[in-house]
Image (spheres, rainbow, N blue to C red):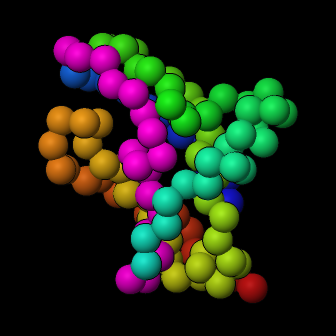
Amino acid sequence: MVVDLSVENNKSDSVTLTSEVVNLVAGEATYSSNTQAETALIGEGANTFFLEDLGPEVTAKGKVAFDVAPGVLQKHPKLQFNELGFGDTHGYIVLPALNG
C-alpha cells in the first residue's frame, strides 16, 4: 500500500523524518513503513519521507509505502503519526477498509 502524505513542521527546530514517524495500524497489529519499497519509489522519481530533513515551518509532500497482505487492509486500517522527535503524542487518520 502506498499513501500520499503532506507533513508540516510547526516547531522551531528541524527534524529528520524516519520510518518511525508513520505506522499503519490494523486491528491489534502495527506495521512500519517499508524502506525497500520507498527506495524503489525514489527510483521512479517519487518523493518519500525516508531520512528527509524538515526545517521549521516547512511542508513536505511524499509517499509512504507499507508491505502488508491484502487481508490487513480489511481490518479498518489507520495511519498513526508519531510526534516529530518532541514527545510521544500520536495522531491518526482512518483509512477506508478494502473489501474483497
Left or right of 4 in this view: 51: left
Q: Residue lying furthest left in this view? A: 87
| Residue 80 sits above or below residue 15 on the image | below
Task: List x then y, in percent, for residue 36.
Answer: 69, 49
Q: Quadrant of residue 71?
A: bottom right
Residue range in magenta is 12-28
Left or right of 8 in this view: 31: right
Task: List x then y, in percent, for residue 6.
Answer: 50, 33
In which quadrant is the N terminus drawn?
bottom right
Q: Which residue sits at x=55%, y=36%?
A: 50
Q: Along the line of sight, which residue is nearer the eye, 78 or 23?
A: 23
Q: Which residue sits at x=75%, y=85%?
A: 100
Q: Which residue sits at x=49%, y=59%?
A: 32
Q: Residue lying furthest right in this view? A: 44
Task: List x then y, in percent, for residue 41.
Answer: 75, 39
Q: Along the line of sight, which residue is nearer the eye, 29 or 39?
A: 39
Q: Along the line of sight, which residue is nearer the eye, 9 or 20?
A: 20
Left or right of 61 in this view: 53: left
Q: Along the line of sight, which residue is nearer the eye, 97 or 33?
A: 33
Task: List x then y, in percent, for residue 55.
Answer: 36, 14
| Residue 82 sits above or below residue 44 on the image | below
**Residue 59 visible in the current orientation:** no
Left or right of 22 in this view: 10: left
| Residue 85 sits above or below residue 15 on the image | below
